[in-house]
Image (cartoon, helix red, strand yellow):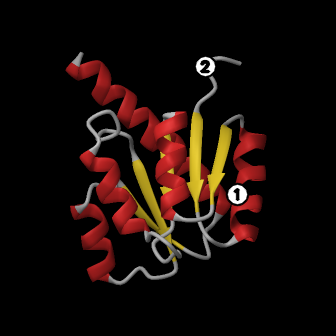
Amino acid sequence: MSNQQRILLVDDDIQILQGLKMRLSATGFQVETAENGEEGLAAAQAARPDLIVIDINMPIMDGFTMLSRLREDASMDNTPVIMLSANVSPKMKKEGLKRGARCFMEKPYDSKALVQTIQSTIRQSADLADISA
């Protein structure tokens, strides 16, 4: 299916990656995964996903650094990003939004709410692209 939307999940928790990949795949998304920010950045540049879900606390490269690097890449600077983390302090939310995340969701997450957030974020991104075209 060529118009299948591509999602990249970046998290060092394998159980979260596997569970979320199954849920999103069952919803009709094409899902790629990465276990740290460095792998995530490489996967994002190779796959050009429609949306990226990033955890904050990861080895090698954290989620904030990955997000900043994505925003430095002109071809990825408008790719919507959802931060998904157990650390949802106001300071962390502010930092994520400042670096270019579209929204911040808390772990443990409600899978139905996360899927709805992903779908609406992709729709909003497509609407913004249509307006600016």
Residue 29 seen in the current view: yes
**Callout 2: helix, strand or loop?**
loop
Give the amino acid type for the residue marked by disc 2 in the picture.
Asn
Give the amino acid type for the residue marked by disc 1 in the picture.
Leu
Horizontal relation, residue 108 to residue 22: left or right? left
**Callout 1: helix, strand or loop?**
helix
Q: Foreground residue, 127 or 35?
A: 35
Q: CA distance from mark 2 to mark 1?
A: 21 Å
Residue 7, given in percent of the width and then of the height, sits at 58, 42
Horizontal relation, residue 97 to residue 89: left or right? left
Residues under numbered marks 2 and 1 in contact, where contact means CB atoms less than 8 Å apart: no
Q: How many marks?
A: 2
Residue 104, given in percent of the width and then of the height, sits at 41, 65
Decide: few, some or many residues near mark 1? Use Cα within 10 Å; few <14, some 14-19, many ≥20. Answer: some
* Identity of the residue drawn at 43% across and 43% down: 121
Question: Which image quarter holds the N terminus?
Answer: top right
| Residue 120 image label | none
Residue 48 higher or lower than 38, as above or below: above
* Identity of the residue drawn at 41% across and 79% down: 88
Q: Earlier in the sequence, mark 2 or mark 1?
A: 2
Horizontal relation, residue 99 to residue 1: left or right? left
Q: Which residue is mark 1?
A: 20
Q: Which residue is mark 2?
A: 3
Residue 111, given in percent of the width and then of the height, sits at 66, 60
Residue 44 higher or lower than 41, as above or below: above
Residue 124, given in percent of the width and then of the height, sits at 37, 36
* Identity of the residue drawn at 74% across and 42% down: 25
* Identity of the residue drawn at 35% across and 57% down: 67
Q: Foreground residue, 48 or 42?
A: 42
Image-quadrant location for residue 74: top left
Decide: few, some or many residues near mark 2? Use Cα within 10 Å; few <14, some 14-19, many ≥20. Answer: few
Image-quadrant location for residue 133: top left
